[in-house]
Amino acid sequence: MVRPRPAHARACAASQSSWFGWLAGCLAAAAALAADAPAPLAEPDVVQRVWATDPRVTAADRAVLAARAAARAVGAWSGPTLTVAALYTDLRGPDYEAELGQNLFDPLRGAAVQSARAALAVAAGERQLTAWEVGWEARETFAAVVAADRVTEVWRADLALLEALRNAAQRARDIGERPGIDVQRAELEVSRGALALAAQLAGRQQAAVALATLLGEPPDAALVCRASSWPSEVPPVDALLRRLPDHPRLRLARLQVALAGRLVGASRAQQWPSLELSGFREDQEHGLRLSLSLPLSPARTAAEVRAAQAAGAVAAAQQEAAERAARNSLHRARLALVAALAQQRQQSETVLARSQRLLELAQVGYELGQATLLEVLDAKRLLTAARLEQAELATAVATGWLTLQAAAGESPASVTLAAPPPNMPPPVLGPPLPTATVLPTAGLGAAR
């Protein structure tokens, strides 16, 4: 079956008659590829989209609306009440009584209004915490996709190195400088590299499915994630601790303590009398009545006050525990980030640089007939291992910054974008550059 070629392939094939036509076709192909490629996603866009579609945030918004409606209902003016009673007496026979009453002072109303407002503040704090947690979950899921892309690029570069080595072995076999077993070994390594890349692509797809689920996209959606930049210096502890009181968890803990205090006040308000003015009609008598109601259950009221105070003590203890946990998480996150940055810097300056140099010398030695294929493969494995370690350290640094920002209570929408990371081109097998000097290096063991 003949499959139709895509637009960019047809554009290149239709303009091969001249150099100018070939150049125009390639430009048209690049434009077609750019049009077909999905736009890269940035962390702020992902967070905003998740906030707009996540049902947990929607539920928290509705909880705030419900708490606001409850606060308005409690604070609304209580109008007069009309009471009509039908009765039968042996003197008057069938009769009725009517009474129109208006409460003048209700000690529970003010306390109930304050408690309802405190409950509304708690609902708003819970909504903020929910959105904060959902946003950070989106950033962590986004970071997992970026980390998978980072490792995928390493395995792509590894496969490109193996293919270049196989081509070099084929050229050396064709001119009689190398045996054919080198080509067979290189082909085996290419197959193993392709399998490793396929496994990594499957892992990347799993991370992308998790992100697509958060975004409300289909599982097979093509998602291209753009990495974020991170500062090279960690803020001091004092600056981080100054931000800690604004942490959504700590703010919610304070609001819960305030709500517990309002509930204690509401329990105590039950001890105060209420005053009511009413107009009544009884048989042929009409008049006004001023009623004073005094509760006569001090033991029950005192028990309710003690229960509310105990709940307030629990909320205060939970607030203190949350503050201690926040400080502990902040210190630990900062120490982990400092260690990850130091390891990344040291690994890049020593292991990665030396591994790259070792492979370059091994490649040149293979071209000159002074190194075997196994030595080149060994140098390639060391470089791939160093690149994987560098990718893991880059992921550790990104995770460390995310953890530190979350521990400090920062908004998940505060992100600094970086330029698109450059591609990792594999070293080209061939003769050294004119400015290069190939010397035997005892510490690297590449050229002999």
Image (cartoon, rainbow, N blue to C red):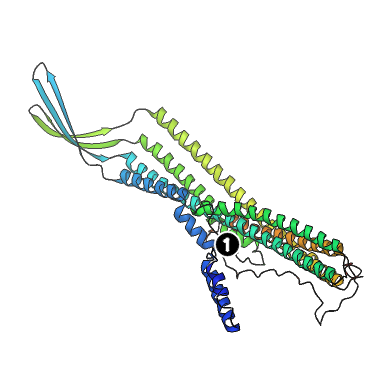
How would you rate the neighbour count of disc 1 (Cα within 10 Å): few for under 14, some for 14-19, many for 20 or more? many
- In front here: 292 or 187? 187
Residue 372 image position (x, y, % from top left): 88, 65
Which residue is drawn at the image coordinates 82% and 67% (left, top)?
Answer: 169
Residue labelled with disc 1: 225
Residue 354 visible in the displayed image: no
Q: Is residue 323 above or below residue 177?
A: above
Q: Which quadrant holds the C terminus? A: bottom right
Percent x, y of residue 440: 91, 72
Q: Nearer the viewer, residue 247 or 135?
A: 135
> Would residue 322 appear left or right of 158 to someone viewing this image?
left
Position in image of residue 180 (x %, y %)? 85, 63
Q: Is residue 313 left or right of residue 59?
A: right
Residue furthest top as drawn: 90
Picture coordinates of residue 232 (x, y %)?
67, 67
The amino acid pointed to by label 1 is Cys
Could you tell me which residue is drawn at 84 percent across and 70 percent down? 172
